[in-house]
Image (cartoon, rainbow, N blue to C red):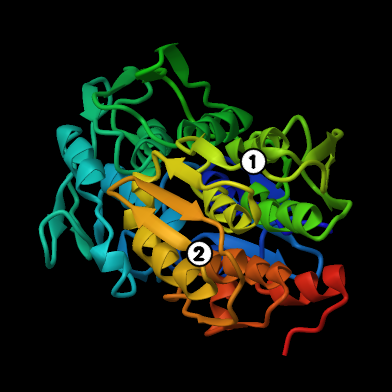
Amino acid sequence: MRLPGSKSISNRALLLAALAEGSTTLVDLLDADDTDRMGDALAALGVEVERDRPAARAVVHGVGGRFPAPGGALFLGNAGTAFRPLTAALAVLGGDYTLTGVQRMHERPIGDLVDALRLLGCDIRYLAAEGYPPLAIGTAGGKAGRAVEIRGEVSSQFLSALLMALPLARGADALATTVKVVTPLISRPYVAITTNLMARFGVAVATPDASTFEVPAGARYLSPGALHVEGDASSASYFLAAGVLGGGPVRVVGIGRGSIQGDVAFAEVLARQGAEIRSGDDYIEARAGRPLVGGTIDCDTIPDAAMTLACTALFARAPTRLVRIGSWRVKETDRITAMATELAKIGARIEAGEDWLEVTPPERFMSGTIDTYDDHRMAMCLSLAAFGGVPVTINDPGCVRKTFPAYFDALAKLTGVTAT
């Protein structure tokens, strides 16, 4: 199974390429709703992006640090990887912008990012509920050279967005800016993706300790010429799980041992659970091994792939408890509540708390109709319940267009079973 491009890398790379000096060719770029929202926003801001969708390629003509359009209204759907970084970049640059999304995006918190940006001098106003989109951005802009504090326990996207925006701050040519994370940072590997890509575009973020990030004076984005987008590690989890539940082997191509994505650790978790895993520079392969053992799994560094573990838990020989998954509650839906509800339909016994979920495997699988809550990962994860030997109906399967429009076609090709 050749994977589509990583959403996390694709949207970060689109924004960094747009802000860089020079043109950048992005290879194996994801073609899905979330990248469309970023692409549409960049076009509205005056960035020229040439997309070759059949070839999964784009050429982004960078604007050298300032968008041509000084204002405008941007609709960003439910794409957090577009909404948060664009909020930071536009606020630091200053202008006359409004940012809106779908209703669920207006229910997803953004206050920690806004508070940090205001410490830089940015003018950001809430247009509805305090702490939530939609937002209005004013002309003040942000100033470099300050020590900024930000909270990290709700979403790592806030820190990533802030770091990507700091080279745009006024005075950044002469003054460094320090960011201090003042609470535990969840999903740290996603911040590593950010700093890795920033380095590819010429900005090296220093990390003198685990909670401190320094953007140096004189930092500016320069095109690397071309950048290859890895396959999506979160999407890989569904097919690796299928390799284990269906016997396998299944090999996913497009990521491997050297991946910059934290979700490749999903394969290591599967191995500890009993699966047989092999990997190389550009692939990971999974097949059934020992019966899956269950137990407690700390999911802090793999929050998206952890949803797949909730479904492999259906096939374990003992209950599985997923812990440190509190970020699920502020994703595309409240994923702890949604997953608990839908897994129960299949026959699992479920217990849940504020930041954990425990799945006791069904004594027998029940055929179920799964609601997806307009959440792509609910649809993809819960399709794996069909390995229990009963029909599973997925409502609104089209929600997978957010990150993986061809998911059900790919699953059908892999299993030889046609989805209807």
Q: Is residue 271 left or right of residue 381?
A: right
Q: Is residue 291 left or right of residue 219?
A: right
Residue at the front extreme? 363
Q: Is residue 251 left or right of residue 323?
A: right
| Quadrant of res 93 | top left
Secondary element at tag 1: loop
Can you tell which mark lies on residue 3?
none
Front residue of 103 and 296: 296
Q: Is residue 270 left or right of residue 123?
A: right
- Disc 2 to disc 1: CB gap under 8 Å: no
Front residue of 419 and 178: 419
| Quadrant of res 50 | bottom right
Rendered location of residue 132, percent (x, y):
20, 59
Secondary element at tag 2: loop
Q: Earlier in the sequence, mark 2 or mark 1?
A: 1
Rendered location of residue 239, percent (x, y):
75, 57
Q: CA distance from mark 2 to mark 1?
A: 16 Å
Q: Quadrant of the C terminus?
A: bottom right
Label 1 sits on residue: 293
Q: Residue at x 42, y 18 (%)?
A: 216
Label 2 sits on residue: 348
Rendered location of residue 119, percent (x, y):
16, 33
Q: Residue at x 64, y 37 (%)?
A: 269
Q: Quadrant of the N terminus?
A: bottom right
Q: Residue at x 21, y 36 (%)?
A: 116
Q: Is residue 99 visible?
A: no
For residue 392, above or below residue 290: below
Q: Is residue 220 visible?
A: yes
The three-letter code of the residue at mark 1 reads: Val
The three-letter code of the residue at mark 2 reads: Ala
